[in-house]
Amino acid sequence: MADNPFWFVYTKCQKKNTPCASYVQALETFDFEEEHDKLRRKTRCTTRMKFQTFCKVINPSLTKHTMYCNHDVLEQKRIATTRLRLSSHNLAIERGRWLQKPREERLCSTCHVIQHEQHALKDCTLNTEARRSSQNPDFTSNFFAAEMPDVITATCYTLIKHFI
Ligand SMILES: [Zn+2]
C-alpha cells in the first residue's frame, strides 16, 4: 500500500484530520438505503411547490425511473425527459417562477392559459402536430410510468425540445 499514491495522500490526510479524510471515512460506513430513505422523507415533507408537484404528480413512489437503466434510450431524450420531470425547462410556469410572476400570469404565448408541463404535453396547440405523430399519444394515463422508457422519452423530447 505504501507505493499507492492514493493511499499515501489518504494517510497524510488522516494524520491531519482533513475534511477529505473525514469524507472518505464516511464513505466506508455509508448506507445507501438509509440515506435514500432520508432523502425521500425530506422530499415529501418540503413545502416547496416544485417538490410537491414532483411527489404528487411526476414520481409519487420516488423511485428511479427505468429510463436510467435502459440502453435503448437516447441520451438527449433521457436528458429532456429528466429536465421535464425536474421542472428544469423554459416553459412559462418555470420562467415565471424565476421572475417571481404570479402563477396565473405564466401563460403560453399561443394558447393564453398557464403553460405548465401538463399543458405542454397534452393541450398546447404548438405541439398538435408532434402529438399526432407521437408513438404514445395517451397522456391521460400515467405518462411517466416505467413502461416503454424509449417511447416515453422520445415523445417527451419531441414535445418539449423547444422548451429546454
Ligand atoms: Zn400552449
Image: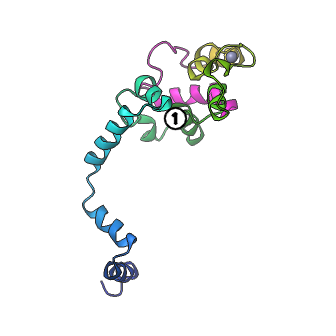
Say which residue appears at 25% left-offset and 47% top-offset.
34
Residue type (three-letter) at the residue carrying disc 1:
Leu
Q: Nearer the viewer, residue 6 or 132?
A: 6
Q: Is residue 55 above or below residue 6?
A: above
In the image, taking residue 122 as reference, residue 32 lies left or right, namely: left
**Label 1's element?**
loop
Is residue 32 one of those drawn in magenta?
A: no
Q: Position of residue 40 (x, y in %)?
A: 34, 38
In the image, taking residue 8 as reference, residue 144 lies left or right, namely: right
Q: Is residue 56 above or below residue 86?
A: above
Q: Quadrant of ligand 1?
A: top right
Say which residue appears at 49% left-offset and 28% top-offset.
49
In the image, taking residue 154 as reference, residue 113 lies left or right, namely: right
Mark 1 packing: few (<14 Cα in 10 Å), some, or many (20+)? some
Q: Position of residue 1 (x, y in %)?
A: 30, 83
Colour pattern of the rendering: rainbow
Mark 1 C-beta closer than 8 Å to ligand 1: no
Q: Which quadrant of the view contains residue 68? A: top left
The residue beneath circle 1 is: 86
Say which residue appears at 62% left-offset and 13% top-offset.
123
Quadrant where the C terminus sits is top right
Say which residue appears at 68% left-offset and 20% top-offset.
105
Residue bounds of the magenta highlight: 135-164
Q: Position of residue 152 (x, y in %)?
A: 51, 26
Is residue 136 one of those drawn in magenta?
A: yes
Q: How many marks?
A: 1
In the image, taking residue 27 as reference, residue 97 lies left or right, namely: right
Q: Is residue 134 above or below residue 68?
A: above
Q: Position of residue 154 (x, y in %)?
A: 57, 29
Residue that protrudes farthest toward the right in the picture: 110
